[in-house]
Amino acid sequence: MSNKRVYLFHEGNAKMRDLLGGKGANLAEMTNIGLPVPPGFTITTECCNYYSKHGKFPEGLMDDVREALAAVEKDMGKKLGDPENPLLVSVRSGAKFSMPGMMDTVLNLGLNDQTADALIRLTGNERFVWDAYRRFVMMFSDIVLSGQYPDLKKEKFEHIFDALKEKVGAKQDTDVDAAGLKELVGQFKEYFRKVTGQDFPSDPMKQLELAIEAVFKSWNNERAVIYRNREKISHDLGTAVNVQTMVFGNMGDDSGTGVAFTRDPATGENRIYGEFLMNAQGEDVVAGVRTPETIDQLAEHNPEIYQQFVEIAKKLEQHYRDMQDIEFTIEKGRLFILQCRAGKRTPQAHIEIAVDHVNEGLITKEEAVLRVPPEVPGLMLLPSLDPDFVKRNKPTVLAKGLNAGPGGAVGKVAIGSAAALRMAEAGDDVILVGRETTPDDLGGMLASRGVLTATGGKTSHAALVARQYGIPTVCGCSALRIDEAARTISADGVVLKEGEYISIDGTNGLVYLGQVPTKMPEVSGKFATFMEWADSFRTMGVRANADTPEHAAEAVELGATGIGLCRTEHMFMGDRVPMVQAMILAEDEAAREEALSKLLPLQREDFVGIFKAMKGYPVTVRLIDPPLHEFLPSLEELLVETTEMRVKGETGPAYEEKMKLLNKVKELHEFNPMLGLRGCRLSIYFPGIVRMQVAAIIGAACEVKKAGLDVHPEIMIPLVGIVTELTHIKEQLEQVAQETMKAEGIEVDYKFGTMIEIPRAALTADEIAQEAAFFSFGTNDLTQMAYGLSRDDAGKFLPLYIEKRIIPVDPTESLDVKGVGRLMQICVEDARKVNPGIKLGICGEHGGDPDSVKFCYKLGLDYVSCSPKRIPVARLAAAQAALEKDGGSTRDK
Ligand code: PEP
Ligand code: MG
């Protein structure tokens, strides 16, 4: 741990995010470029980590805090707790990566009866002081002590306030006068004494110490942990604590507070976009309780301040060379900047702003490509409500709110997070509906297709989070009434029960009754430009996992330059099942050949369709992989059916057929089919199937070539673990390929290769690579076998492993670099030694995961292959990998 634990704002700078957190580093930077930042200091993230580890502050931390505080006091000419001229401070969290609303903040710290009196004397504004005081008692109790005393939660205090409002006949908080608020402070303190048996802490230094501790603790609160897991932010970073002089937006009508973005965070449009409330504190804007005014209206309240703000916003965007999210407060006609950070934005805005910034000369194309998170192109492809359907059918509009998160979503109404989680778990698409959403609703929001709230502005924390994840969101829908007890929502006299369908359009804020179909967007305009830039830096290929002509065409549309995995068993489903079953049940070779000959033209037709759709790009076709019993009914089902038939005396030919099927299922039954008769083992056991498949592949390729099109099939033999498995099958299949070409009277370019899915295959690559023109890492199986876990059952315990921090991420989603990655590395090195020209790729699910794609780039793979929808994600991740190769990640995380 470094010696210096507390930094005054002017002692830091923007580069010190590790130590000072993003907020602290930016406050320091803004102070240094001369912006009006209220003075303060930052306690380092190292102190938080020390606290998390030891459960106490590092020795002497409070002495350092006192010293820094003295410097701030000197600067301000005020002192914390001074009965004549008191200083009040805010105590805020601020980690290296922004975690909006996930951790804690205490405002107005330093208030007690004496300092309150002094402030009344100094400001002459009694109402303001009692308002600040009642907020402080509530917030301090909630944040600092409600862990120990659950009855100190904010809601309890709000009930007391509601009762008082009713008593004095006030509708809004602002209708309560100074006397009312003074009475409220008394009631709050009395309630505090009742709950804790002690007086509310009046010593400001003690308040400060407890608040710092609460912020440290909030690093590990539940929602912060969920957020970090989701965002793959390390749990070891810790939060800094910023102690800053309070300025007040609630000092009357010449005061106010707000949040603004230097560009529209929903669309990316180049205009200042924000919200503010006059005579309010920051929490009123971000908590989404009062619906705020838009930033343009600030020009009407105070044109000079508006102008000053616009200039500062421009300066900050130019300084940081990125869109900024700025929190500001106006205290008695004077503007203060409390915070700035790179603004969260929708996927659309990410692209729009990156492209505009390049066109404006603010950043380079490389920076633009590196700056956009690789998940963004995937989110850009989220559906919107079908505009043609809306035009034609005019679905009933239930209500209109603010367009807080673009995109369209359809689902069943779920009132509150708990219901949303429950219904989503049961398999429903849900729209989370609530009066407001708080950061505590993160889990519920992530489980929902969309979010709809009655109150709250577009800069509420929940709206920020929704936008970040591309969850279509409509908020501030004031006509909406929610009856939690009756489990209904209503607007304009229309009542809907929980579980009924609504559709929301987060792009224009409309809420429709019933289900409006959704439509996929196209890659065009600035998105297309951005992806072209990404491709210009990319060196690794991106292919698709696709097994129908439609998917293949979609993949090409989305930028794939080949198919990396065509799973042929998918072609044995649907109305072809009876043919496949006949083949499995055949009693002799002749009957099996006959069944296979029926499948051959159908398979060939499939491949013709795919080859045509791929327009000459290589197509890797994997021969049949799953165990045969997957094409037969289940044992249990057949046992029930045959028993029923017997009981009813139906023992004719139909019964005989069923019994035959049952016996075959019993014969094929395996205790552990994933490690059983599948992949190349099945081909060795039943060579007829793969012979038919190769005849179909090569036959189709010949046909397509005759039609004048380019075609490059790559035939992939799965689940090889021993080189002789490969040679055994390849020999027979080479023969089929040659015979087919001869019969067709034309030659095609084809290759044989294998998947690397068994650890033994990776470790004996020096042998296998001599027999294969290409390898494709089947990292689904490779992960399963390297870990000795079942990919079908691991869902039971892997989430627990992540929650308990046994592993940081699910290895079935993101490649385990240390173990599975090591196997891959050995394999790549050994294979290239004996076969330098071997083509190497990956086709497990990891091929669409940005971190895994970057690892594959480092390994030197020729391509990654993923599902069509992930292709733009993989393209961007691969471009970033190429750009990062020297400088490491410059991503904001
Ligand atoms: C793999 O194992 O990674 C793979 C792509 O094959 P499958 O998922 O079909 O087993
Ligand atoms: Mg596999």
Image (tube, helix red, strand yellow):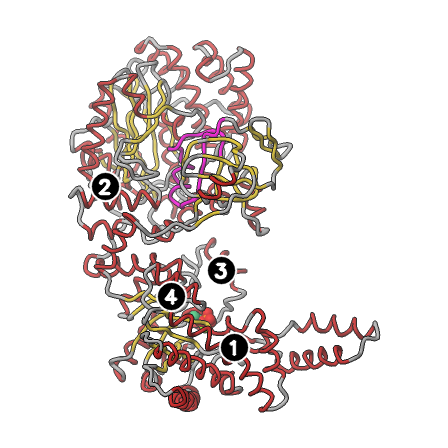
Residue 21: image location, x then y, percent: 28, 41
Task: Name the residue carrying label 3.
Answer: 798
Camera sees residue 234: no
- Distance from disc 2 to disc 4, alpha carbons, whole Å, reads 33 Å
- Distance from disc 4 to disc 1, alpha carbons, whole Å, reads 26 Å
The answer to which of marks 3 and 2 sits earlier in the sequence is 2
Give the structural element (helix, strand or loop) at label 4: strand
**Of labels 4 and 1, the one closer to you:** 4
The answer to which of marks 4 and 3 sits earlier in the sequence is 4
Give the structural element (helix, strand or loop) at label 1: helix
- Distance from disc 4 to disc 3, alpha carbons, whole Å, reads 27 Å
Identify the residue at image location x=21%, y=36%: 317
Give the residue type that dot 2 points to.
Answer: Asp
- Distance from disc 3 to disc 2, alpha carbons, whole Å, reads 38 Å
Give the residue type that dot 1 points to.
Answer: Leu
**Of labels 2 and 1, the one closer to you:** 2
Q: Which mark is residue 675?
A: 1
Q: Residue 322 carries which label?
A: 2
In the image, which residues are magenta? Answer: 453-478
- Distance from disc 1 to disc 3, alpha carbons, whole Å, reads 21 Å
